[in-house]
Image (cartoon, helix red, strand yellow):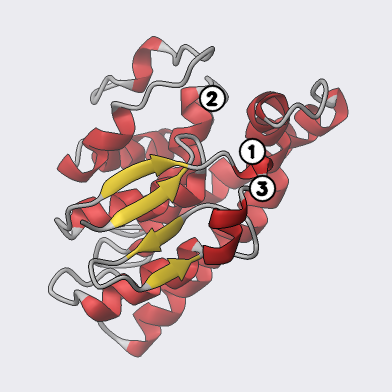
Amino acid sequence: MRVLYHLPLSPYSRKVRLVLAEKRLPFELRVEKVWERRPEYLEMNPAGTVPTMIEDNGLVIPDSAVICEYLDEAYPDTGLMGRTLAERVEVRRLTAWFDGKFATEVTQNLLGEKHMRRLAGRGTPDPTAIRTGYTALRYHMEYLGWLAETRKWLGGASLSLADFAAAAHLSALDFIGDVDWSLSVPAKDWYARMKSRPSFRGVLADRVPGVVPPAHYLDLDF
């Protein structure tokens, strides 16, 4: 059985889970507490991050970007990287945007401070970082709304990895009640379409000790 080492609220883990589910590839989840720096895990992924996937044949694949590229090459029937060269460029650009710029400016300042800092035992949240995260979220939601309003999917005409990267970050933030969906109706409508997909069921079913998601988290028509 394919194994994915993950953390429930890691957006990078969620992205891979969504891609696996969209491609209908079975997998077993194993929680990896990366702050424990487990030697056996570091042998598989020296960076000590999640996710890491072990394929059916024993191939170890670390890092969500590497895993998703691998999955699209190994299982191309459900392609998620775009159909033309131009589309593939745009999908990669947007995936890098959400996994890089959005993650640094929003996810790390909100989810990282409010949740991951506590899990790792690194003290109390930094209120300045949290304020910075909320400010950045407004600008990112405007951009996301523009993408959703001017295109069928974020990357263009077809559902792609860009949609799953964005949805992974927003779903993790939504779990802790940190997304103000009134900031952008088009972004909210796009996310409602995303979380209504069968591939989202596993992510929506997550439960995290000590965190109660808002009522709308599970509502497909919120």
**Image vertical order of residue 74 relative to residue 65, above or below:** below
Instruction: Tell me, for residue 137, which label it has, or none.
Output: 1
Asked whether, in this view, residue 79 is left or right of residue 171, the answer is left
Q: Residues within 10 Å of mark 3 (few under 14, many from 20)?
A: some
- Residue appearing at x 56%, y 44% in the figure: 142
Q: Amino acid at mark 1?
A: Leu
Most foreground residue, 92 or 114: 114
Tag 1 secondary structure: helix
Residue 118 at x, y percent in the picture: 70, 24
| C-alpha separation, residue under disc 2 versus residue under disc 1 | 9 Å
- Residue appearing at x 43%, y 35% in the figure: 171
Most foreground residue, 186 or 123: 123
Q: Earlier in the sequence, mark 3 or mark 1?
A: 3
Mark nearer the viewer, 2 or 3: 3
Quadrant where the image shows the N terminus = bottom left
Instruction: Tell me, for residue 75, which label it has, or none.
Output: none
Q: Which residue is mark 3?
A: 37
Residue 31 at x, y percent in the picture: 44, 39
Q: Which residue is mark 2?
A: 180
Asked whether, in this view, residue 182 is left or right of residue 54, the answer is right
Q: Amino acid at mark 2?
A: Asp
